[in-house]
Amino acid sequence: MASPTRGAFIVIEGLDRSGKSTQAAILHSRLQGPEQSAKAVLLKFPDRTTAIGKMIDAYLRSQSELDDHAIHLLFSANRWELATSICAHLAAGMTVIADRYAFSGIAFSARKGLSYEWCRAPDVGLPAPDLTVFLDVEPEVARARGGYGEERYEQEGIQRGVRAMFERIGEEMNRDGQGKWVVIDASKEKDRVARDIWHVVESLAEGVDAPTAKLWQ
Ligand code: FDM
Ligand code: MG
């Protein structure tokens, strides 16, 4: 078998309090582990450390007000500013794990009433994930997990609308052969969810023998 040409790009998506960050960290340490030769890098979107990320952070904490279109474009720009480094990591044979990506961008903005096509447009051409794992949890289960925080969007009604948008995105991804979208029941206990994720990720851990696709292109 030819050796893989690059690392895999894996996105973890889901509602707030679905366990994304916990599961992304577990997956990251597992991919880094002594038995796997591939090294992994963990990214988080929004990346609040950049200049654009700081504007997003202020908006999410209600310290600033922005037009819905403007904040949408900032979230997208925040991905584009990391696109080159994602490609560089993949080319170096690293697995890249992203905690949220363009799918959150569409789901949260389209729920506000912005056009779905308009929301998708600025992310067209980003590095496409090889696999997106959607951690599915009922919004009331998510809320019961210690409650939502104080940030914008952390409300059950909003999360319900966002979940419906995610469902549409996942169906379209699989229908159009745009990289695999797998739904995992995230209401189960943490170790069980981690095992279910590993089951779908394992075959990608050694890398991918195909160029990185461009999202929605
Ligand atoms: N969010 C996240 C968006 O609205 N658009 C995006 O493109 C991204 C990546 O930001 F409510 C929302 C989703 C969430 C909020 O995310 C902050 P974290 O994962 O809670 O930091
Ligand atoms: Mg949050």
Image: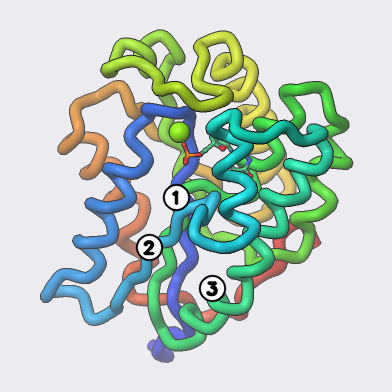
Q: Residues within 10 Å of mark 2 (few under 14, many from 20)?
A: some
Q: Residues within 10 Å of mark 3 (few under 14, many from 20)?
A: many
Q: Please state which amino acid type lies under the numbered disc 1.
A: Asp
> What's the CA distance linking mark 1 and mark 2?
8 Å
Task: Give the residue at mark 1.
Answer: 99
* Spot occupied by residue 55 in the image (x, y as percentages of width and height): 64, 49
Question: In the picture provided, is 136 more to the left or to the right than 84?
Answer: left
Task: Give the residue at mark 3.
Answer: 86
- Does residue 108 lie above or below 157 as drawn? below
* Spot occupied by residue 27 in the image (x, y as percentages of width and height): 27, 55
Q: Residue drawn at (45%, 14%), measured in percent from left and top?
A: 139
Task: Give the residue at mark 2.
Answer: 42
- Does residue 6 lie above or below 175 as drawn? below
Q: Residues within 10 Å of mark 1 (few under 14, many from 20)?
A: many
Residue 58 sits in which quadrant?
Answer: top right
> What's the CA distance linking mark 1 and mark 3?
13 Å
